[in-house]
Image (spheres, rainbow, N blue to C red):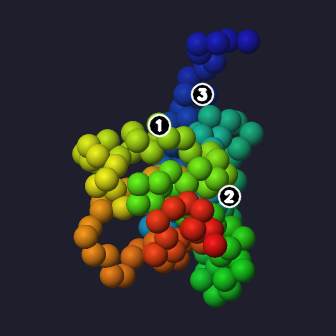
Amino acid sequence: MPIFFNSWEDILRVIIAGLIAYPGLIFLLRVFGKRSLSKLNIFDFIITVALGSVFASVVTLRSVTIFDGLVTFVLLLGAQLAITRASIAWEWIDALIKAQPTLVFFRGVFLEDDMRTARVTHDEILAEVRQKGIACLDDVYAVVLETNGFLSVIHHKDHITNPTLADLHNFDAEATTSKSLRS
């Protein structure tokens, strides 16, 4: 079995499949909208990975035809569209497919229980704070592990009237300690 080269026919198939499947995928992504490549939650991430896997299979595997790939693209993107529309219509579907953001640091306190549940370390929080150019934790109001896996760092302000943290299950604007956050 050749490792470096099979045949010119195989190379030609890869070129033709790539030249058809790639524009086909781009067209379908435009039709199905920007959300198709977002990484807003695990469901969107899985769709993005699956699209890449199907594309690679179409281009490299003889057993997967271009038509098979295009149908699979439509199926994946159609399923994503249906589920995201359903999640807008019904909150229980939204809660089923999306993780909730988690407060992991608040007003100078590392929220140890929530950090442990979210599998976030002190070092990861400190690194994200440093990447935002903040030298002192006193300048940090909160750190949130978002649904896409990124940490959001919110700068401390003297007066916060309408906090963006209001939708977090473990947020209490009046709380000053991790213990009072859960009450």
At mark 2, the secondary structure is helix
Label 2 or label 3, whichever comes before in sequence order: 3
Q: Are marks 2 and 1 in contact (CB under 8 Å)?
A: no
Say which residue appears at 32% left-offset and 42% top-offset: 130
Residue 131 picture quarter: top left
Amino acid type for the residue under numbered disc 3: Glu
- In the rendered image, residue 150, in percent from the top left (x then y), is placed at 47, 52
Q: Is residue 83 visible?
A: no
Residue 87 picture quarter: bottom right
- In the rendered image, residue 10, in percent from the top left (x then y), is placed at 61, 28
Figure quadrant of the C terminus: bottom right
At mark 1, the secondary structure is helix
Number of numbered discs visible in the structure rendering: 3
Q: CA distance from mark 2 to mark 3?
A: 25 Å
Mark drawn on residue 9: 3
Say which residue appears at 39% left-offset and 39% top-offset: 127
Q: CA distance from mark 2 to mark 1?
A: 41 Å
Label 2 or label 1, whichever comes before in sequence order: 2
Residue 70 picture quarter: bottom right
Figure quadrant of the N terminus: top right
Q: Residues within 10 Å of mark 1 (few under 14, many from 20)?
A: few
Q: Is residue 60 visible?
A: yes
Residue picked out by circle 1: 123
